[in-house]
Image (spheres, coloured by chain):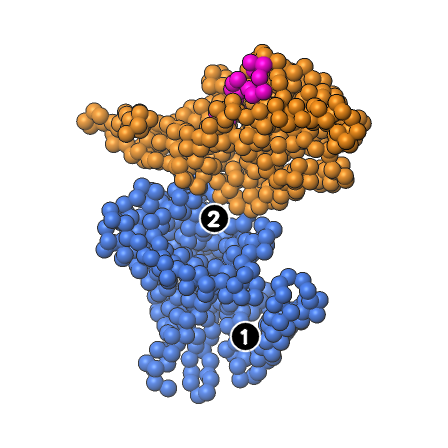
Amino acid sequence: MNFYLLTLLKMALTAFVLLTCCAYAVWVERKVLAHIQLRPGPYRVGPHGLLQPLADLIKLLTKEGIVPSYANPFFYLLAPWLAVTLALSAIVVIPFTPEFELFGVRTAIGLTDLNIGILFLLALSSLGVYGIAIGGWASNNKYSLMGSLRSSAQMVSYELPLAMAIASPLLLVNTLNLRQIVEQQGGFYFGFLPKWTIFAMPAPQILAFLIFLIAAFAETNRVPFDLPEAESELVAGFHTEYSSMMFASFFMAEYANIITICCVATVLFLGGWHPLWPAQYGSDFVPTVLLAAAGLILLYHAAQAARGRRWDRFTFPVFGVLLLALSPVFLVPMLKPVLIPFFWFVAKAGFLVFVFIWIRGTLPRFRYDQLMRFAWTFMFPLALANLLATGLIVALAG
Amino acid sequence: MNPTDTAMDQRLEALEPEAPGAPRRMVLNMGPQHPSTHGVLRVILELDGEIVTRAQPDIGFLHTGIEKQAEALGWQQVVTITDRMDYLANLSNNLAYVLPVEKLLQIEVPPKAQWMRVLLAELSRINSHAVWLGTHALDLGAMTVFFYCFREREELLRLFEMFSGQRMMTSYIRIGGLALEPPRGWDRAVRKFIRSFPEKVNEYEALLRENPIFLKRTQGVGYAPLEQLLDLCVTGPMIRAAGLQWDIRKAEPYSSYDQFDFEIPVRQESDVYARFLVRLEEMRQSARIVEQALDGMPEGPWKADAPRVVLPDREKMKTQMEALIYHFKIVTEGVRVPAGEAYVPVESPRGEIGFYVVSDGGTKPWRVFMRTPSFGNLQSLPALFEGRLIADTIAALGSMDFVLGDVDR
């Protein structure tokens, strides 16, 4: 097949999937938070609020986009565009599956195979600050300005430990290409312990992973580092003045960033598409079993009936049957080399997204100065020490 | 332009630095629609970067004229507007109004009504502290605590509804006793709640007490020395967190509080964390008091034997001439309170609340002055804010635990 045609197709698919994931990340976040907080969460639009993202989108699209008269209109409009573009474009270097052959075409899920993928990601995440800084400044609102100042300082500070935490696994895999990084993490120690970089001999990168995760929370402005939008202090932080799709762009950028950073963590530390345990012990059957179990649980609840919404009697069996029908797809030999690695990738990244939400339901917020002190006096030296130690071990182990 | 506007402009101008070369300060208008001012408080902050150099509270956005209204209502009717002042602890307010009036009337309230009042006041203390804890934690970014606290509050509101038919504006405590007979099964419902409550407090504690981020946000924050707080008329948990063991329930027991066994938590640090611990412990102590009240609830009538004040039973009205006459007199003319003045302080969840009631012998109060704890506590705002970071002002603001309806009345 034509290379360009294939790339276009993949681009369309990736963009569609990513945007859908962003929308449903919001739904998942609201649902998980709600269940942590003893409430049902979105429940009205569609079965169990499943159409809520669509409703939100329609609402935001049809709202009036207000540009305050005292704002700088050019930069005011540029900022959300910048934020969302940069956040979405970071996904292009993520490799989701190994190369496979389907209908005579040899390809992989993942847009490009950049040999400096990591550097590209770091560059984009640094540029992401601009959207927030410009947005806060151009709004000409005191709360926005303070929100964007905080955010800029925070993101610049946490980039250092983030970069350090990324650098140390790179010493082990010795490449900047994300696909090669994942490929090097294949295989198992003693036949069961995966050779992911967090377990990699001779220098396991558990510490680097934790530093990366904490810095990622700060990079994406999430609790406990959500100071830029600390609503109790700064109303809504840098996007106080934004409305309609301009606000939605910032919102989408935040979730796109979360998804991207979870994918990066999966690639760098959790072995990308490699399974949790070897295929000879049946790891290939995990997706089938999971989907089938989910389908059966739904059918069981459908049989119980009369609990929850009236529509549940209709939607539960439909979704149950749908999931049951989907589960054997993972056993089709032709699709197996695509779907199984993709499942593992999505499962790991999805778990990390869940951790992001979980933390949000649990922790209070740092104070601004405490957060900066934490970055410079704790995270940075720790990341540096980890990098030096890894370098030393790698050099000695040869 | 009305005079208050001018005064505000002058204050704003006074905040702007005049001397050339003086450091440029940003004036931030926090409120009245700011998400964490809990109502409609406006605070004018002068900022040097993120540090507050001066703070000016501007109150009055929720002015309801309750004090003046009280002069136009009959003695019994005033109870209903006391609910609207501090809408989180309305039963304490009812009690605080009723006590001085009963003092003027020289009514002896039967023990059952007194114990019932104690029980209800303590339940409303738990209610108020639960709302405080939830919103305070929400301000600090801990979202989940909010929902946990409101779960308990919901149960409490159901209890209040059971008693009075109203969730918030209960008006249940009346001059001479209670508004209605306690409903059937009330003791079982209250016991069910109070049994499980200490466990819930442990839950809040587990989420916050040793959370390093929470500790960092609250320890040493919002400090003010005891003497300054006393000068500013601060009362309640704030003063107890500053090291003064002052609780009117112990110091000047009213409504048979002297028959209950409870402790007054005191901390020395006078910071946001100390206030958190004090209120947390107060919730436990309140639960203890409620249990004691349940166990030892005396038998007897739930309203005083004062036919000129308390409405007679329906039964008696149909059989006794006097009851019908009294009923007619109370309803058409109102209650007459002998001339005089009285003040009985009460420990509300926020501190000392008291109604200074003056009567000229008529059927309406001549004057009702309200000494409200929120107003006093809010005076400490500049002391707690100045020289601190904006983020700290949020923590300090939450720890004051004021209700704007109580401040402005």
Q: Is residue B244 left or right of residue B304?
A: left
Q: Residue at x 53, y 84 (%)?
A: A334
Which residue carries the number 1 mark?
A340
Colour in which chain A is drawn: blue
Residue A318 place in picture, x, y as percent = 61, 74
Element type where label 1 sits in the image: helix
> Does residue A129 lie above or below A235 as drawn?
below
Decide whether residue A299 is among the magenta residues: no
Colour in which chain B is drawn: orange
Q: Say which mark, if any, is on residue A223.
A: 2
> Does residue B357 lie above or below A107 as drawn?
above
Residue B85 place in picture, x, y as percent = 53, 30
Label 1: how many Cα within 10 Å (few below 14, some 14–19, many 20+): many
Q: Nearer the viewer, residue A179 or A125?
A: A125
Disc 2 marks a residue whose amino acid type is Val
Q: Chain of mark 1?
A: A
> Does residue B248 lie above or below A155 as drawn?
above
Label 2: how many Cα within 10 Å (few below 14, some 14–19, many 20+): many
Quarter residue B393 falls in = top left
Disc 1 marks a residue whose amino acid type is Ile
Start-end of magenta stretch: B359-375
Q: Is residue A94 visible?
A: yes
Q: Is residue A67 left or right of residue B137?
A: left
